[in-house]
Amino acid sequence: MKSYLGLFSGSLFGGCLLFFVGAPMPFLIGGIIGSACFVWSYERQGRLLLRLPPYIRSCAVGITGAMIGSRVPPTLFEILSEFWLSALMMIPFVLFAHIGNYKIFRHIGGYRPVDAYFSGMPGGLIEAVLLGEKAGADMRILTIQHFVRVLSIVIFVPFLFFVLTGEVVGSASGVSMSKAVHGASDISLIFIIAAIGLVVGKAINLPAAHLLGPLMLAMLAVIVFSVQINFPHWLLNCAQFVIGTTLGAQFSGVNRRMLGRSLWLGAITACFMLILSLAFAYFLTPFVPMDVKELLISFAAGGLAEMSLIALSFNLNPVFVALHHLLRIFLSIWLGNLVYNYFLKNKLRI
């Protein structure tokens, strides 16, 4: 119990510190850094931090999903057809990202081909680990490398926006949202939608059910029943804080050598994928009704929940961002498995 208290205290300290210095996404990034520092300090004496119960992250992600769904435009289905090109361009993006990541892990990191291949998949952490395990890859390498990918993208994207636009994601950018009229009924509705969505999403085996269940239920309420939901900015900060804490806690049990290697390789691949995402974003801007910021968040290969949360914090359209990331994850798993099976079947080297 004391270790959990220390973990959340470290996360809160990190979040408040970054908030006061005006850093982007302070409670997400600060939460990651603060909780990770506590983990390293706690485990230096040979102790191992107990894993956080999974329902803690699920609840925070469920609330995030409900908030994302509440921002859907009522005319969603009328304008979806305008995004076919950005959806189509996700295919070459996934292929280029996977090839580039493989080269980095194989030739710079020195990983075995099978480890480099499944570490380089630009999406689907759980799926990549399971597919890699069947192929004989090292699960430890895959788990930490995909976690570092998500972590690096989540940290780099807000700072990249700050450098390019001068806007601080997660603080000033959410002011317009926080000024909306809201009350206890709105907050209660968010929690009810999150709770029902979590149960229904798992019952019907939705992918990323803890996010998509509440998201789709909130979308249904807005589009079909014309429900208007306004939520306070502090609720968004709380979601950032909890998700940041659970991400930082993932450093438990990782030895320094593996962590050090994974961090610098993850930083290289994150920079590569962000440059690639930026190139696709600038190319697509004239052809789709999204600006560079929305497209960059849509293509940046972070976690589905985390990138949607960044979009929500930046007052962009989180629904379209979430749909792009779902497509990226699906293509990463499908194409990655297809290509690997082709090489395996024909006994070719990758």
Image: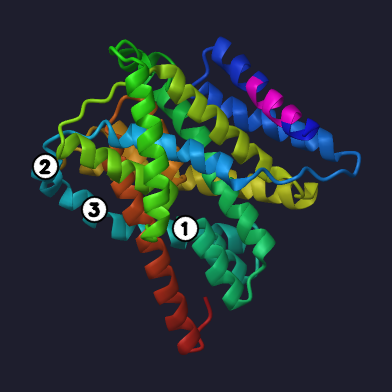
Identified at 17% across, 47% down, the residue is: 83
**Height in image: 346 above or below 78?**
below
Task: Give the amino acid at mark 2.
Answer: Ile
Under circle 1, the secondary element is: loop
Residue 144, relative to residue 277: is it above or below? Answer: below
Asked if the magenta segment contains residue 130, the reply would be no
Residue 230's quadrant in the figure?
A: top left
Could you classify mark 1 by the number of other residues whose Cα lies within 10 Å: few (under 14), some (14-19), or many (20 or more)? many
**What whole-number distance in Å separates the C-alpha atoms at marks 3 and 1?**
17 Å
What residue type is disc 1 on?
Answer: Gly
- Pick whichever of labels 2 and 1 is earlier in the sequence: 2
Q: Amino acid at mark 3?
A: Ala
Residue at horizontal 31 percent and vertical 32 percent from the top: 293
Q: Which residue is mark 2?
A: 79
Q: Is residue 118 left or right of residue 333?
A: right
The residue that disc 1 covers is: 124
Q: Classify mark 2: helix, strand or loop.
A: helix
Residue bounds of the magenta highlight: 5-12
- Quick one: label 3 or label 2, which is nearer the N terminus? 2
Residue 87 is marked as: 3
Position of residue 274 measured from the top left corner of the image (x, y, whole percent): 43, 42
State the image coordinates of residue 7 (x, y, percent, origin top left).
71, 31
Q: From the image, state whether disc 3 or disc 1 is nearer to you.
A: 1
In this rendering, does residue 76 appear at all? yes
Which quadrant, please, contains the N terminus? top right
- Label located before the other in sequence (3 or 1): 3
Q: State the image coordinates of residue 327 (x, y, percent, origin top left).
A: 32, 55
